[in-house]
Image (cartoon, rainbow, N blue to C red):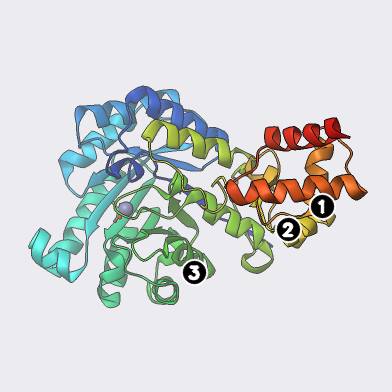
Amino acid sequence: MSRNIVIFDTTLRDGEQSPGASMNLGEKLEVAQALVDLKVDVIEAGFPIASPGDFEAVRSIAENTKGATICGLARCNDKDIDRAGEALKPAEQGRIHVFLATSAIHREFKLKMDKQEIIDRAIAGVKRAKSLCDNIEFSPEDAARTEIDFLCKVVEAAIAAGATTVNIPDTVGYATPAYMGRVIADLKNRVPNIDQAVISVHCHNDLGLAVANSLAAVENGAGQIECTINGIGERAGNCSLEEIVMALKTRSDFYHCETGIDTTRLVPTSRLVSSVTGLEVQRNKAIVGRNAFAHESGIHQDGMLKNPTTYEIMRPEDVGFQKTDLVLGKHSGRAALADRAKSLGYHLEGDKLQEVFEAFKKLADKKKEVYDSDIAALIDKRVAAH
Ligand code: KIV
Ligand code: ZN
């Protein structure tokens, strides 16, 4: 039986914290609607105490965006929590997300609080949030660098105080998959009330491991993944939504998990977020990059024309691309050229194919990519010469 994984999107909160990614209210509303169409479960719409603009964005998304739980972030103090509660009032379903750092580094240098003070503050914050909203998420910030015994105590206290989701952030992208898997397994084994809450994971990508770490967390019992479209976020970004969702879908044989995501909306949503933030998607980005379903090598193109599963583990239309792109370049072979010519309305075979192929190879040596118009011109020239 497959287990449902809650997809918590934080593009509008952690994603917007990417340098240069800020969005105006209209853009945020558009992205929020696209996230609903994508069928994410939870949208973290912002950090209401951060600025009047952030408050208004969360309030307005809560009022206008229906079909997902709308979440607002708050530090573990009354002012932040009350502001988040206020912004979320119009939501059909709201969630307050309270966070407090727990690692020794943060305790000593940032908060100047001891362990007991952290536990007391976490309990007070969750209780305050619970008085405003039933659905409460608690995050021990920098959990991946927190002593495991202390992390278990904080998580237990937060659940006892009313947290319905406990999120384990790898705030600085320090974890590796085996390590993250062990943290989640330890929490499952050692926190007595852990089954009363959903365990979530929030991985940053400083070592390029955010998706792998999130998968390891799921394998060990996490039921929610926090992620962003195109993996945008602080520094090297967050776990990429499109990658984690397609990893779970493509390898459902191994993970036995599913999400509610409409994967055919992944590419359009990626394009929308890229255009409103101005953060370009790299060409070879998994799932949504321009090259993700493009093949140039002759051997691959020949295999693809015989059966696409030879070189593709996902179907382009399942993530929202029109179709596989057989890019014609110097590595391409006769089969791909004849196929492209056919789609342009020409029939090439025998000597004619060979002649056009030789001319094509000469041109391809000079150009990075040969376009349909180049091919049509090559064929027309040869046909006219006969
Ligand atoms: O990275 C982090 O620790 C966060 C928390 C607020 C969840 O973004
Ligand atoms: Zn984060």
Observer able to see residue 162:
no
Tell me: residue 334, above or below residue 10.
below
For label 3, the crowd category at 10 Å Cα-Cα, with few meaning under 14, some 14 to 19 and many 20 or more, is many
Residue tagged 1: 335
Amino acid identity at mark 2: Gly
Tell me: residue 191, above or below residue 372.
below
Identified at 85% across, 47% down, the residue is 353
Q: Which of marks 3 and 1 is in front?
A: 1
Quadrant in the picture for the N terminus: bottom right
Identified at 26% across, 31% down, the residue is 54
- Give x and y (percent) for residue 197: 43, 58
Name the one closer to the observer, 145 or 160: 145
- Give x and y (percent) for residue 196: 44, 60
Q: How far apart are marks 3 and 1 (CA)?
A: 41 Å
Task: Tell me the SS state at disc 2.
Answer: helix
Q: Do the residues labelled 1 and 2 touch (CB within 8 Å)?
A: yes
Amino acid identity at mark 1: Ala
Residue tagged 2: 298
For label 2, the crowd category at 10 Å Cα-Cα, with few meaning under 14, some 14 to 19 and many 20 or more, is many
Q: Distance between the residues labelled 3 and 2?
A: 36 Å
Name the one closer to the observer, 325 or 287: 325
> Residue 216 — which label?
3
